[in-house]
Image (tube, grey):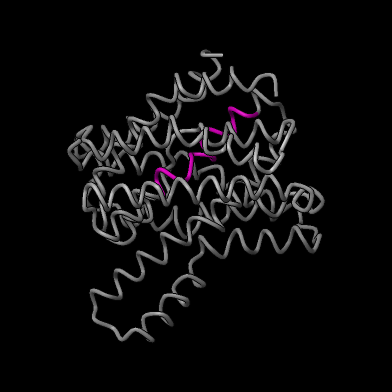
Amino acid sequence: MLTVIASTLTPVFVVLILGFIAGKRKIIDNLQVRSLNLFVMNFALPIALFKATALTPRAKLLSEYHFVIVLVLTMWTTYALNFIIQKRFFNTSLGENSVQALTIGLPNITAIALPLFISVLGQGSLVDVAISICVGAVFLSPITLLILAYTKASTQGLPVDKQIKDLLIHLIERPIVIGPFLGILVAFLGWHIPDVMLNSAELIGKATPGVALFLTGLVISSQKIHFSAPVISSVILKNFIQPFIALAFVLALGLTGPSARAAILIGAVPCGFFGILFGLANDIRSEVAGASLLLSNIISLFTLSAAIYFTASM
């Protein structure tokens, strides 16, 4: 099992390190990555999320409501706990706190859960992965987007009513929000997507994990990596506590079988890169988020192995 997880995590580290080296050696300017970030956030990632959600069978979406509820509650709880801890004990600013909370609350489903689930749970688990991506994009990411938009509006001294209006417009207009919502609409309406469109979406969507991880490495290369108290507390919450939060909701809602195991394993997957990219798009470079992502992925070699072993009988 360690071999399977190591083979899944190794490409993640390789691409992160490539981005880190490119930034450190100034092959690419690690302070001027806005264009690359715009490509990921406005094109590659929204298209990848649209394809993943649009191809999810409607019957599966409707029948897996307990699975969806468990994921939503797990992500919301982790997000809220990290947000409260960072604010109360480390006095983190609102914008950076939202970036860190998303980094911890939303696992790296695209780059890690997808290949891992195929190896551990088989091809049938791809639907669970697609639903998980959809849940993160629809129920968690918008919270950070709203907070970041509010922070920016507040610094500009806009009236409250104008802030609210601008926040809603800002959220609705974001491709990262439009993509998965359109995908859900297509899935529920049962519309057929032409093969040429699917092939086009797959071509650009495949670039998402690699480019996003490379970009994350670039951003981390511009920061000082300190495994400080905020980082360690966040990684403990993500790697050690979030799987048990998922287990608690699985038991409370009576979820059983492969979906129950999938929900717990999603919680055990290490930090994702959405939060860092969202922060970058709003001129927030969180050193805590970058260090947390790095440490979480390292530790997950052991914590994810443990989660797979202890859920094998489910």
Q: For residue 105: magenta?
A: yes
Counting from the top left corner in percent of width and height, residue 143 is at: 45, 61
Counting from the top left corner in percent of width and height, residue 232 is at: 29, 33
Q: Judge by depth and name the residue closer to the eye, 115 or 28.
A: 115
Q: Judge by depth and name the residue closer to the eye, 81 or 304.
A: 81
Q: For residue 275: magenta?
A: no
Vertical relation: 94 (above or below) 126: below
Where does the C terminus fall, quadrant-wise? top right
Residue at position x 64%, y 33% from top?
A: 262
Q: Judge by depth and name the residue closer to the eye, 10 or 274.
A: 274
Counting from the top left corner in percent of width and height, residue 153 is at: 30, 75
Q: Based on the displayed image, in which of its 4 quarters is residue 197 positioned?
A: bottom right
Q: Main secondary structure of the magenta part?
A: helix
Vertical relation: 286 (above or below) 213: below
Vertical relation: 184 (above or below) 204: below
Residue at position x 43%, y 31% from top?
A: 239
Q: Based on the displayed image, in which of its 4 quarters is residue 218 positioned?
A: top left
What are the residue bounds of the magenta stretch? 102-117
Residue 206 vs residue 128: left or right?
left
Residue 191 vs residue 105: left or right?
right
Where does the N terminus fall, quadrant-wise? top right
Q: Judge by depth and name the residue closer to the eye, 129 or 239.
A: 239
